[in-house]
Image (spheres, rainbow, N blue to C red):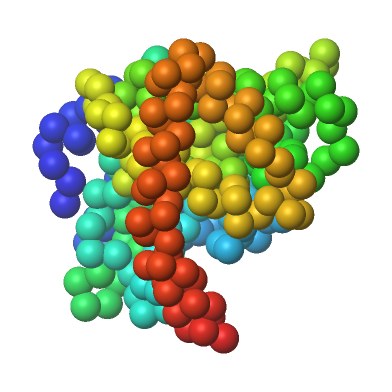
Amino acid sequence: MIESALRAALSEVFDFDEGPRGLLAVRRSARRALASTGFALDSDGAAADSELGGRNPLAALQAPGESYLVRRFTHGGLLRWLTGRRFLDPERPFVEAHLSERLRALGLATPEVIAARAVRALAGAWRLDLVTRRVEGGRDLEAELTQRLARRERAQLFEHFGSWLARLHACGFLHADLHLKNVLVTRTADGRATLWLLDLDRSALRSALTERERVANLARLVRYAWRRREPLELRRVDFARGLRAYAPARDERRRLWRAIVSRLRSRALAHRAGWWLEARAGR
């Protein structure tokens, strides 16, 4: 069901429950706490809808002294109207759990994975779920930008975000769905921000990224943010601050920005057509 190498890597931290219906991997240190919620291979236990999440709300699980979130894998774009929660690849939550462990080992903040599950559905498809430890007191970056931040605080946030992205790319990490809602912001008592990676599905950690890959990742982020520039009151100076922190050298920064703009222009028509179709499918 999952490759032996992946299973062996996860077995250092996770136990496996396997049956005719599928496979569940549970973090060994949290096994008892998760069991107390009733969550298992064949049961969602006490999972209830939470206030968190975007298009697909997250479910919440409460154990003694622990809070968990359940993310149910759902297709994006037009596929979600056709296939819903059914997937052909049962490995995806387990791959994500392993990627999360690798990122945390590098010192990159991402919620701790508690369990990964694949359950058989009709016609050879699978329903996939990932359970993570809830990060308390955080807001996604889009929600953070809707707050009345002081000018200096807002500038610092964009600078921090840009340098954080540079570190991710320098580590070889490529987020498959990089946008503002997939970045969580928590703050210390003195206001210092920590940025967390959310939703690592289909993302990758490589030895190095090419400039083409970095440009594509940044262009995706800029396209998402630019569509929301009015409610978020985004200005060109915000983008400039983030890019300056990402690429301090002027020549590199100019080269990257020209490449980002070129990519956005070359794909503008295709994206507009996709948004138009998606909006009508949703109706």
Quarter-of-image position of residue 252: top left
Residue at (35, 19) in percent of width and height: 171
In the image, 65 versus 59, the foreground residue is: 59
Residue at (39, 28) in percent of width and height: 255
Residue at (28, 40) in percent of width and height: 95
Looking at the image, residue 276 sits to the left or right of residue 269; the answer is right
Please determine whether, in this image, residue 94 is positioned above or below residue 187. below
Residue at (72, 21) in percent of width and height: 156
Please give the count of numbered marks on the rendered protein: 0
In the image, 234 versus 124, the foreground residue is: 234
Quarter-of-image position of residue 138: top right
Q: Position of residue 271 (x, y in %)?
A: 42, 65
Quarter-of-image position of residue 139: top right
Looking at the image, residue 215 sits to the left or right of residue 133; the answer is left
Looking at the image, residue 111 sits to the left or right of residue 12; the answer is right
Q: Is residue 254 visible?
A: yes
Look at the image and tell me in which quarter the C terminus lies.
Answer: bottom right
Please determine whether, in this image, residue 256 is positioned above or below residue 231. above
Q: Is residue 116 visible?
A: no
Please determine whether, in this image, residue 72 is positioned above or below residue 133. below
Q: Residue furthest left?
A: 4
Q: Position of residue 35 (x, y in %)?
A: 50, 43
Q: Position of residue 66 (x, y in %)?
A: 64, 34
In the image, 243 versus 188, the foreground residue is: 243
In the image, 61 versus 36, the foreground residue is: 61
